[in-house]
Image (cartoon, coloured by chain):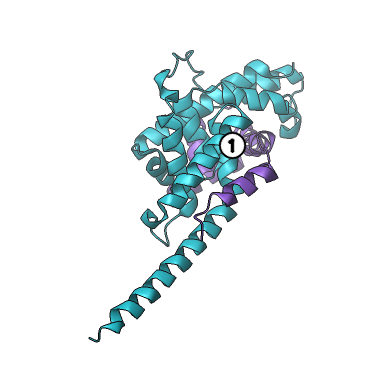
Chain colours: A cyan, B purple
Amino acid sequence: MSESAPTSAETRRLAEVARDRVRFEEEALELSDQVYRVARRLVGSREEAEDLMQEAYARAFRSWQQYQPGTNLRAWLLRILTNLNIDRGRRAQRTPDMQPLEEGDYFLYNKLESTLGDENPDEDRVIERLSQNSVVEALAEVPHDFRDVLVLVDLGEFSYAEAAQILDIPVGTVMSRLHRGRRALKQNLAEKAVI
Amino acid sequence: MSCGCGDCEKMMQPYLDGVLSDEQVREAQAHLADCPGCEKRYRFEVSLRRFVRVAVYEEMAPELKVKLSSLRAPG
């Protein structure tokens, strides 16, 4: 080995690292709309979501080398973001005691249908009993632990396994929280339905 | 009124999530084809999920995008 060889190898390596970093940053920024979509509903306000996004992206850009290329970058970004959200002490306030949940999955449909006074309504007419604002409120009122899972799976379209990895909880817990979260959402929607 | 088949009601969310086995999917499809009550509720669940996704969507502010971009490492 000559003396100069390591230097040029080192230069090449640094150039590669710089290129990889730029590629990482560009990919992460391209995903920001999708990450925001989830972040916005993990917290209560636009301002909180924007703060959280900035914190998460700052951390992601600092620790980009921990990301394994070829794995799901959107999930990796959301793992950082959900961790930051939990670290913010949001969990200091424990999940409040929930009202008992309705037993059946058909509960919301049955309730809405019964308000129509129509024997066999089209499902779109049943949906019309709900307003956009009521959905936003109903989701915000789902307790945090359940809402995190609900938002990741139903809005972020992550699989159970991905949601488990993002939140660092077992898949079984994802499934039970999702189940309870969806029930809670439906219950809240039923209470806010336009009757 | 619901058809009263509790099994079908329990299968609904896993069916919508696409996590049932092939055999269970065939069972669910056969049941839905046969039971107008569940079929209607199935269509409702599909519409509800779409409705929720659209209703809670809020576009990211362009200024935030600029801010995120500015957080990149210098150089």
**In the image shown, does A147 or B48 lie closer to the viewer?**
A147
Q: Is residue A98 above or below residue A17?
A: above
Q: Residue furthest bottom?
A: A2
Q: Position of residue A166 (x, y in %)?
A: 41, 42
**In the image shown, does A123 or A67 lie closer to the viewer?**
A67
Q: Is residue A22 above or below residue A39?
A: below
Question: Which image quarter is the C terminus of chain A in?
Answer: top right
A171 horizontally vs A118: left or right? left
Q: Is residue A124 visible?
A: yes
**Amino acid type, mark 1:** Glu
Q: Position of residue A194 (x, y in %)?
A: 74, 18
Q: Residue furthest left?
A: A1
Q: Position of residue A123 (x, y in %)?
A: 71, 33
Residue A6 sits in which quadrant? bottom left
Q: Position of residue A45 (x, y in %)?
A: 61, 28
* Residue position marked by numbered label 1 in the rendering: A50
Question: Which residue does the image show at 66% across and 38% down from the upper left?
Answer: B57
